[in-house]
């Protein structure tokens, strides 16, 4: 009897200790509002708690009909790595068909288990889904199949991550269009500027990485504005005005690449941050989008056009500098016929605009 009681006490103490350990991980994870630290916390917790060989988090994206996966976080016996943006090597998207074991996970939201006989590893893939959309895949690689308790732990942390990600996603996106909102713009653009500065530093490893990725460091910002949008609201009502913005956001997603950043700044104004090898490539992409909008019939409203102003992003720019130049090009497009794409650099070289004075304050965005 005494021995049995002692075993129960030991078992209870062990379970309490494990519970405290789990709760400490939960506390550590939920204190982060940064998406990268959240992902790293979830992967690190699972790596330790289920005794995994490695844990990976993949972001799912779509361009046209093709699905892509980008590994954004890795925790393994070889260390930790993560990508804070698409500019990091680990964040490079790969076609989903390159990882066939994840196809059912992404396309059908199924948990997939696979035995890698060559490496004698067991791979467990869990879909990360919010509102019936699979946003990514959690991959847990172990030397043996996960026991029921460990499966429960993995699913529990996945649920925690999913719920917290949903809150972050809600705070970062425009409620009408689902595009990134104004609040997240500064953070995204700061990451780009940081990337450009580090690329200019002359660091040999950074230079080699850029060469391997064929990344020439050219980044661009475009401001998109709906022409005569007030007339749409006045003539058809705000409900149809919202429909115009929703369809425009959908056309943006279809027109630009999955690595381009799309923002709604408010009202009828949108921003696109994209990367390209030349100004001609940027002009072609923006012209293609402008033409797509012009050719589309909007419900009840009919034809809608847009004006676009864009500029290149330099390493030592401030955010007000960049937005100000693109906005100046947009104003020129608006004042000279609308339904066109204007480059600030081209306007400057032809004398159609004058060099901008430096803003007095970082708060002067427009």
Image (spheres, helix red, strand yellow):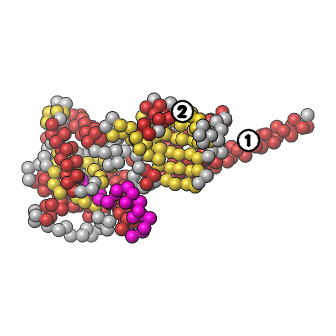
Task: Determine if residue 41 is in view.
Answer: no
Q: Residue 238, image x and y in percent? A: 22, 37
Location of residue 261 with respect to 297 vertically, above or below: below
Residue at numbered disc 1: 15
Q: Residue at image x 13%, y 56%?
A: 332
If you read the primary sequence from the N terminus, does the residue marked by circle 2 or circle 1 appear first? Answer: 1
Q: Quadrant of the N terminus?
A: top right
Q: Quadrant of residue 9?
A: top right
Q: Secondary structure at mark 1?
A: helix
Q: Quadrant of residue 294?
A: top left
> Residue 268 got which mark?
none
The residue carrying pointer 2 sits among few (fewer than 14), some (14 to 19) or many (20 or more) residues within 10 Å by Cα, namely some
> Residue 112 got which mark?
2
Q: Residue 229, image x and y in percent? A: 17, 43
3D distance between C-alphas at marks 2 and 1: 29 Å
Q: Which sits in the foreground, 8 or 54?
A: 54
Relative horizontal placement of residue 201, taking residue 111 as reference (left or right): left
Q: Residue at image x 16%, y 42%?
A: 291
Q: Residue at image x 60%, y 45%?
A: 46
| Most distant residue in the front direction | 118
Q: Residue 169, image x and y in percent? A: 42, 44
| Most distant residue in the right direction | 1
Task: Determine if residue 250 is in view.
Answer: yes
Stretch of the chain drawn in magenta: 201-222
Relative horizontal placement of residue 119, taking residue 60 as reference (left or right): right
Relative horizontal placement of residue 264, taking residue 30 as reference (left or right): left
């Amino acid at each position: 009897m005494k021995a049995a009681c002692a075993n129960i006490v030991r078992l209870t103490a062990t379970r309490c200790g494990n519970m405290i350990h789990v709760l400490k991980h939960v506390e550590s994870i939920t204190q982060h509002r940064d998406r990268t630290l959240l992902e790293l916390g979830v992967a690190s917790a699972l790596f330790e708690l289920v005794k995994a060989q490695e844990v990976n988090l993949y972001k799912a994206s779509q361009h046209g009909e093709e699905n892509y996966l980008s590994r954004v976080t890795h925790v393994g016996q070889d260390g930790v790595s993560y990508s804070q943006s698409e500019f990091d090597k680990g964040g490079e998207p790969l076609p989903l068909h390159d990882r066939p074991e994840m196809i059912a996970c992404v396309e059908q939201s199924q948990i997939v288990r696979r035995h890698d006989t060559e490496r004698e590893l067991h791979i467990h893939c869990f879909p990360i889904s919010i509102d019936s959309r699979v946003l990514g895949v959690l991959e847990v690689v172990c030397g043996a199949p996960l026991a029921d308790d460990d499966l429960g732990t993995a699913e529990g942390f996945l649920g925690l991550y999913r719920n917290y990600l949903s809150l972050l996603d809600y705070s970062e996106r425009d409620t009408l269009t689902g595009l990134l909102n104004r609040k997240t713009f500064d953070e995204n653009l700061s990451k780009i500027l940081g990337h450009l500065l580090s690329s200019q530093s002359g660091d040999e490893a950074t230079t080699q990485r850029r060469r391997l990725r064929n990344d020439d460091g050219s980044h661009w910002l475009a401001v998109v504005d709906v022409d005569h949008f007030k007339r749409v609201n006045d003539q058809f009502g705000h409900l149809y005005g919202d429909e115009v913005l929703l369809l425009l956001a959908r056309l943006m997603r279809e027109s630009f690449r999955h690595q381009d950043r799309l923002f709604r700044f408010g009202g009828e104004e949108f921003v696109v941050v994209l990367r390209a090898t030349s100004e001609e490539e940027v002009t072609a992409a923006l012209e293609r989008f402008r033409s797509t909008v012009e050719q589309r019939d909007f419900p009840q409203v009919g034809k809608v056009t847009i004006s676009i102003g864009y500029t290149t992003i330099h390493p030592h720019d401030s955010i007000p500098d960049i937005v100000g130049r693109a906005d100046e090009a947009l104003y020129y497009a608006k004042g000279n016929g609308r339904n066109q794409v204007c480059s600030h650099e081209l306007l400057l070289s032809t004398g159609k605009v004058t060099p901008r004075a430096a803003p007095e304050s970082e708060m002067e965005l427009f």
